[in-house]
């Protein structure tokens, strides 16, 4: 399934780290940084989560929230270990990952497998996709996202 800039974001409801149902509609009238990542406690995913946490106050001042989604069943240890202040949602059945087109065939050392392609969607306060970063490189990504919100905050 392909998602394009300008279209309405797909609604979903998943469990967060506190086993609470969380939906996009819970964050109406806010900017939503919706990022998909492969796995807790791997180097790139950990760095990305820590970078978002380090910048969480800047993000909140922009009327934004950060929501991470991975196929992991439980994020509690990951959050505690790295003192993360993010909403992390579990999607072990991959339905939301597929809805957003990030569950794809990948290849490593010639072996093909299905997995999450690191992707970030910026959803505006009206619920539309404002920007998409595909195959995200973690270094400086959070700053790019913050700058994109600032560019679009009054549009």
Image (spheres, helix red, strand yellow):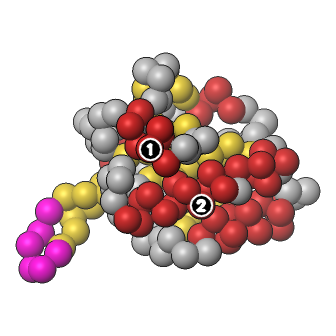
Q: Is mark 2 on a helix, strand or loop?
A: helix
79 relative to 19, above or below = below
The single residue placed furthest to the top in the displayed view is 20
Residue 39 percent across, percent down from the top left: 33, 52
Q: Is residue 47 magenta?
A: no
Give coordinates of residue 135: x percent, y percent: 43, 71
Instruction: Identify the residue shown where x is 35% and y is 53%.
Output: 41
Horizontal side of 146 relative to 48 (left or right) equals right
Q: Which of 110 and 77 is in front in this view?
A: 77
- Tell whether position 112 is magenta: yes
Q: Where is residue 35 in the image (x, y as percent from the top left)?
A: 51, 53
- Tag on residue 109? none
Q: Residue at x 21, y 64 (%)?
A: 105
Q: Mark 1 points at which residue?
A: 81
Image quarter where the N terminus lies is bottom left
The quarter of the image holding the C terminus is: bottom right
Between the residue at mark 1 and the residue at mark 2, the CA separation in whole angstroms equals 15 Å
Identify the residue at image location x=50%, y=71%: 138
Q: Badge 2: few (under 14), some or many (20 or more) residues near its Cα, within 10 Å?
A: some
Q: Which residue is drawn at 62% across and 51% down?
A: 53
Q: How many marks?
A: 2
Q: Can residue 31 be seen in this view?
A: no
Magenta region, residue range: 108-113
Instruction: Classify mark 1: helix, strand or loop.
Output: helix
Question: Residue reaching furthest left?
Answer: 111
Residue at mark 2: 51
Q: Is residue 132 above or below residue 38?
A: below
Residue 121, how many percent across, how many down? 57, 56
Query: Looking at the image, which residue sits at the far right?
Result: 154
Magenta stretch: dominant SS? Answer: strand
Q: In this rendering, which labeled residue sits more in front, label 1 or label 2?
A: 1
Local crowd size for mark 1, using a 10 Å CA cut-off: few (<14), some (14–19), many (≥20): few
């Amino acid at each position: 399934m392909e998602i394009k800039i300008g279209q309405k974001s797909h609604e979903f409801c998943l469990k967060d780290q506190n086993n609470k149902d969380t939906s996009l509609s819970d964050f109406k009238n806010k900017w939503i940084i919706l990022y998909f990542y492969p796995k807790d406690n791997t180097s790139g995913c950990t760095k990305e989560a820590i970078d978002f946490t380090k910048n969480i106050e800047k993000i909140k001042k922009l009327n934004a929230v950060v929501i991470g989604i991975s196929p992991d069943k439980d994020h509690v240890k990951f959050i505690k270990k790295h003192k993360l202040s993010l909403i992390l949602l579990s999607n072990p059945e991959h339905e939301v990952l597929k809805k957003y087109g990030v569950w794809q065939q990948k290849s490593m050392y010639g072996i093909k497998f299905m997995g999450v392609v690191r992707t970030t969607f910026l959803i505006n306060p009206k619920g539309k996709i404002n920007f998409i970063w595909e195959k995200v490189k973690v270094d400086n990504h959070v700053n790019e996202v913050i700058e994109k919100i600032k560019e679009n905050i009054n549009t």
